[in-house]
Image (cartoon, grey):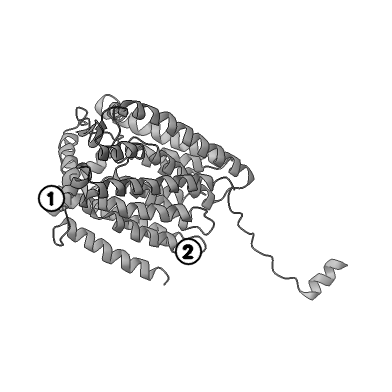
């Protein structure tokens, strides 16, 4: 019964989101968020012909993205509807599965994780249902809820990595045990098998997406872009251009900053790995594993050259899993991410033209949003220093007087 209220709110909010996508409810700049499904539909035509859209620099996805892009194409034919509507229904299915997992697998009876997930996509807006990231997030959530079953965890994390690369960071959550080694081995096996199958079908492994990913510049919403976005208010000699599927900055200092970010990401992840390694030496439990995974993904997002608003879905999903465990240390960081998510919807799509035009209110709102993400990152990583919360062992039943007397003899 404790989950009845979260489920009721989930149903109402998701119905409203779907009605916005279907243009049955008003929403500011609704057409702005529908650009990506049009791209997915274009890719699905190429994929249906048996090829990857390798000539499109916007294609930056591992091979398992292909069936995800094709599924709405088949579904739209079956339902006699548009690709966008079919894609939104697939994303809604992923959202439903995340909610079911969070309400079915609660640690200590907590519904906090479910409430975080109810609120998160609402704060981000209906864009959640016309972006690819919900499908990836469900695999990460399922993996973290299976941390104690190491082989299943490894397989689910690998599927996520073959959908979009970031779930590889979930491996930081593994314990220093034989089970952890088994999970890593299963992860490696699945990641090797998937491209091998595609190579057999198409004659070569589908890794061309890596070239486009590596060539990306500094996206205007990234944390590292914040000083340049603020400098635009003072007539900075730079510009924003559309390339590699996002709005990127060009101008003095941009290339050097973009080149520095991958090493910064590596250092941040090494810090998380070191803290996770030290903490796991003392103890390991599911709450700790989720805390480590959340901190690792958050560190990667904060130091990335790109911070598209849909990336908040990754953090919301992992944060919800953290709060589903009573022993999490990441509550403050998750609340900050919720606040940053709300500002993300304001920035895109509502105030997007004003942000591009360097309006002061929108530019400073972006700075505040990015400061919230930075603060969440610092807190999430710092909270790994104290190690996992030791969950008390179940107390033994009190001995009867007769048993105590016998023991004393």
Residue 152 appears anywhere in the view: no
Q: Quadrant of the N terminus?
A: bottom left
SS class, disc 1: loop
Q: Position of residue 157 (x, y in %)?
A: 42, 42
Q: Tell which residue pokes out farthest to the right in this image.
A: 409
Q: Quadrant of the C terminus?
A: bottom right
In this rendering, position of residue 371 left or right of residue 93? right
Residue 202 appears anywhere in the view: yes
SS class, disc 2: loop
Instruction: In the rendered structure, find residue 170 and report the number of the disc placed on it.
Output: none
Q: Position of residue 40 (x, y in %)?
A: 19, 41
Q: Position of residue 93 (x, y in %)?
A: 28, 55
Instruction: In the rendered structure, find residue 82 and report the number of the disc placed on it.
Output: 1
The mark total stands at 2
Give whichever of 247, 198 is nearer the camera.
247
* Callout 2 crowding tier (Cα within 10 Å): few <14, some 14–19, many ≥20: some
Corner quadrant of residue 399: bottom right
Question: Mark 1 to mark 2: distance in Å?
Answer: 39 Å
Of the two numbered discs 1 and 2 in the rendering, the one whose residue sits closer to the viewer: 2
For the point 30% across and 57% down, which residue is it?
123
Corner quadrant of residue 390: bottom right
In this rendering, position of residue 92 left or right of residue 144? left
In this rendering, position of residue 33 left or right of residue 217? left
* Callout 1 crowding tier (Cα within 10 Å): few <14, some 14–19, many ≥20: some
Corner quadrant of residue 43: top left
Give whichever of 368, 223 is nearer the camera.
368
Instruction: In the rendered structure, find residue 110 and report the number of the disc placed on it.
Output: 2
Give whichever of 85, 336 is nearer the camera.
336
Q: Do tag 1 and tag 2 residues touch (Cβ < 8 Å)?
A: no
Q: Tell which residue pokes out farthest to the left in this image.
A: 80
For the point 16% across and 52% down, which residue is it?
29
């Amino acid at each position: 019964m404790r989950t009845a209220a979260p489920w009721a709110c989930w149903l109402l909010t998701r119905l409203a989101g779907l009605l916005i996508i279907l243009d049955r409810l008003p929403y500011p700049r609704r057409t702005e968020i529908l650009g990506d499904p049009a791209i997915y539909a274009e890719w699905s035509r190429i994929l249906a012909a048996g090829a990857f859209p390798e000539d499109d620099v916007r294609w930056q996805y591992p091979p398992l993205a292909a069936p995800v892009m094709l599924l709405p194409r088949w579904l739209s034919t079956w339902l006699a509807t548009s690709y966008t509507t079919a894609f939104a229904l697939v994303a809604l299915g992923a959202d439903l599965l995340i909610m079911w997992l969070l309400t079915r697998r609660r640690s200590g009876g907590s519904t906090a994780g479910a409430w975080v997930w109810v609120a998160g996509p609402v704060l981000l807006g209906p864009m959640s249902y016309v972006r690819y990231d919900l499908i990836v997030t469900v695999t990460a959530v399922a993996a973290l809820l299976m941390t104690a079953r190491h082989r299943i965890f490894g397989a689910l994390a690998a599927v996520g990595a073959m959908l979009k690369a970031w779930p590889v960071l979930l491996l930081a959550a593994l314990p220093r045990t034989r089970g952890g080694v088994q999970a890593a081995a299963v992860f490696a096996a699945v990641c090797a098998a998937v491209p091998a199958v595609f190579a057999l079908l198409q004659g070569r492994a589908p890794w061309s997406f890596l070239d486009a990913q590596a060539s990306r510049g500094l996206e205007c919403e990234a944390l590292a872009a914040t000083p340049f976005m603020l400098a635009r208010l003072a007539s900075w000699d730079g510009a924003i251009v559309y390339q590699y599927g996002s709005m990127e900055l060009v101008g003095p200092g941009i290339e050097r900053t973009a080149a520095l970010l991958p090493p910064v990401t590596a250092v941040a992840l090494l810090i998380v790995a070191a803290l996770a390694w030290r903490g796991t030496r003392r103890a390991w439990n599911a709450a700790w594993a989720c805390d480590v995974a959340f901190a690792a993904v958050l560190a990667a997002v904060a130091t990335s050259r790109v911070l598209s608003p849909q990336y908040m879905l990754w953090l919301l999903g992992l944060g919800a899993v953290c709060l589903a465990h009573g022993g999490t240390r990441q509550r403050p960081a998750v609340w900050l991410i919720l606040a940053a998510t709300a500002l993300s919807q304001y920035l895109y799509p509502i105030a997007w033209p004003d942000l591009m035009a360097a309006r002061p209110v929108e530019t400073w709102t972006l700075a505040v949003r990015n400061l919230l993400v930075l603060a969440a990152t610092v807190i999430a990583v710092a909270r790994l220093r104290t190690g996992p919360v030791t969950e008390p062992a179940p107390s033994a039943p009190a001995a009867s007087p007769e048993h105590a007397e016998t023991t004393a003899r």
